[in-house]
Image: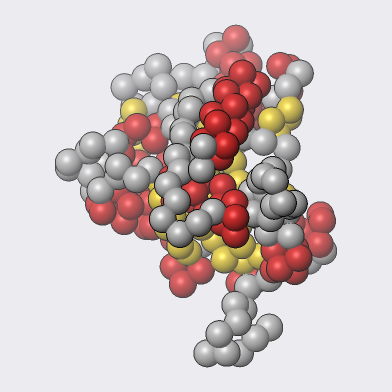
Amino acid sequence: MAAAGSGISPYLFVAAIDFGTTYSGYAFSSKDDFQKEPLKISANVWNAGGRNLMSHKAPTSLLLNPDKSFNSFGYEAENNFAQLSEDGEHHDYYFFHHFKMVLHNNKTLNRNTTVEVFGSKKTLTALEVFSLSIRYLKDDLMKTIEKMFGEIQNNDIRFVLTVPAIWDDKAKQFMREAAKKGGIREAQLSIALEPEAASIYCQNLPVERSGAGNESFLKVAKSGTKYMVLDLGGNYSVAKANLARHISKIVIERL
């Protein structure tokens, strides 16, 4: 690894955690891959189980045991809770779904802010719910990297946590604290605004223009060029992806 102050990043990987309202996931890139091919990005594939579906994101759902210890996250949490409900054994468990909304425009947000358990009046602190979810995503991320590259250390990774641009400083600081409690050292963490992250990605996309070859949009665009980044939001679908490509093509053609 490079020495501190050398100007070279000491991290072998950069990993981004997208903690969404409906779905969450992560992606990562190694330093070597980024230097050769900036858009060579890896992501986990989640198995939805009985739904016969594979996805790069999992539902933002968390299931805790009656003693408030971690049980499962994502599709597994939903499936486990559904099974418990069918058997009438779910009452003592803690199931949280779409809980990110508690941070949206919450003027009184603090360490004691609570999240209500799905279908119950029971509550748990939002900091605990978010930190357990982030810890799971971080640990699963490291397992995925180790399967592909071999054993790594936690300090080999620079973590990026994406947040909505409309969030205030209080909500961003809350996510920092949740990430720290979830096992990510503050020195290894960056908070990135979702539209800025999307914009940087778009700037590296290759464009098809006369004489441009496989040059990236950033290299082809002239100084002062304006472009749009559209967030179609919510549940992913092929139709939305095709619409995004169509709009992007129109915008680029009009540069």
Q: Residue at x 55, y 13 (%)?
A: 85
Q: Residue at x 33, y 52 (%)?
A: 172
Q: Is residue 28 rendered to the left or right of residue 64?
A: right
The image shows residue 76 at horizontal and vertical percentages of 65, 29
Q: Which residue is the extreme one toward the front?
A: 210
Q: Is residue 184 above or below residue 209?
A: below
The image shows residue 119 at horizontal and vertical percentages of 40, 17
What is the quadrant of residue 179 in the picture? bottom left
Q: Which residue is the extreme one toward the left?
A: 108
Q: Is residue 181 visible?
A: no
Specify how the rendered protein is coloured.
secondary structure
What is the quadrant of residue 3 in the picture? bottom right
- Quarter of the picture holding the N terminus: bottom right
The image shows residue 49 at horizontal and vertical percentages of 73, 23
What is the quadrant of residue 45 in the picture? top right
The total number of labels drawn is 0
Q: Residue at x 69, y 52 (%)?
A: 212
Q: Is 62 in front, or is 69?
A: 62
Q: Is 89 in front, or is 60?
A: 60
Q: Is 252 in front, or is 47?
A: 252
Q: Is residue 221 visible?
A: yes
The image shows residue 64 at horizontal and vertical percentages of 51, 35
Q: Residue at x 63, y 73 (%)?
A: 11
